[in-house]
Image (cartoon, rainbow, N blue to C red):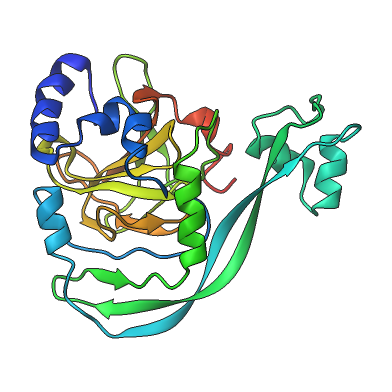
Amino acid sequence: MFEDDRIGQRGLKGFWAVLGLAALLGGCANLNQQQPQQPQPDTAAAAPPASDAASADASSTQPAASAPVTRVVTKTTYVRVRRGDTLQRIAQKHSVSVKDLAAWNHLKPNGHLRAGQSIKLVSKQTITVQVAAPQAGGATANATPNTAGSRQVAAEVARHASSVALVWPAHGRVVEPFAQGTTRGIEIAGKAGDPVIAAADGKVMYAGTGLNEYGSLIIVQHNKDFLTAYSHNRRLLVKTGDTVHQGQQIAEMGSENNDRVAVLFEVRRDGKPVDPMPYLPSSPQG
């Protein structure tokens, strides 16, 4: 867990020194000026955890046979509010519920809209992708056939945003809530091997074991202002540089460098940890 500053400062120095990612957790906006990305379908290649970013990339070069697999992925679009529009009218026009539309945009269901405002719409799409056969060491490599989806993710990661719409990264009970200055996120308990999924579309900025206190760690950038982190996994299914999509499995839950089986889930805004709960549905099934 990204714990209090005295402990975290000592650990994160080693983390940044090994990875060269000082800007990642301290300020996502600067990093994205160099490596943009945005939302829609595409699957990511997987590699075994590595001690640093370079070895993580090197471990993923083996070829593997692939087969078509149907997956449901999330697509995000935006519409411009016209004079006289309401959430109810927009929801009806796009065949979504007012409750969902309000949640995606962090608005009240009866909230007032202004002309020219950008409203986010989220939909599910079924796509067919090529998924590579398991490789030595149990990792699974995924092809990336949807370049249009990758370009959309790139555009989203490159832009500033005032919020981010997340789904639960795991199905389980929150066993440790967020506490400002004490914890850096929430812990969601489960069973060893339970799926850990990407909370939103984005780019994997780090996947590996460079910081021992946190076990196998994945950091995903969603836009210039928001990133999420997933710690204590027993197996990583993506590698640094991959594009991932909301709902895509990125790891298996574990207890690496932790006293229980759980995923530590962080949301960071401008590099600072914030409570993930306001960005999540009301329940893991929500």
Q: What residue appears at the point 26 percent right and 64 percent down from the top-left corner?
A: 46
Please say if 125 is above or below 3.
below
Q: Is residue 77 left or right of residue 214?
A: right
Corner quadrant of residue 63: bottom left
Give the image location of residue 40, x and y in percent: 53, 58
Q: What residue appears at the point 28 percent right and 30 percent down from the top-left corner?
A: 25
Is residue 170 visible from the viewing direction of this image? no
Corner quadrant of residue 120: top right
Give the image location of residue 102, x and y in percent: 71, 35
Q: What residue appears at the point 14 percent right and 70 percent down from the top-left corner?
A: 137
Q: What residue appears at the point 76 percent right and 50 percent down from the top-left corner?
A: 96
User: Quick one: quadrant of the N terminus?
Assistant: top left
Give the image location of residue 255, x and y in percent: 20, 46
Depth check, front residue: 154 or 227 = 154
User: Quick one: quadrant of the C terminus?
Assistant: top right
Give the image location of residue 92, x and y in percent: 86, 49
Depth check, front residue: 33 or 256 = 33
Please say if 254 is above or below 126.
above
Depth check, front residue: 275 or 27 = 27
Q: Is residue 174 left or right of residue 137?
A: right
Please say if 156 is above or below 237.
above
Please say if 64 is above or below 249.
below
Is residue 101 visible from the viewing direction of this image? yes
How many dots with numbers? 0
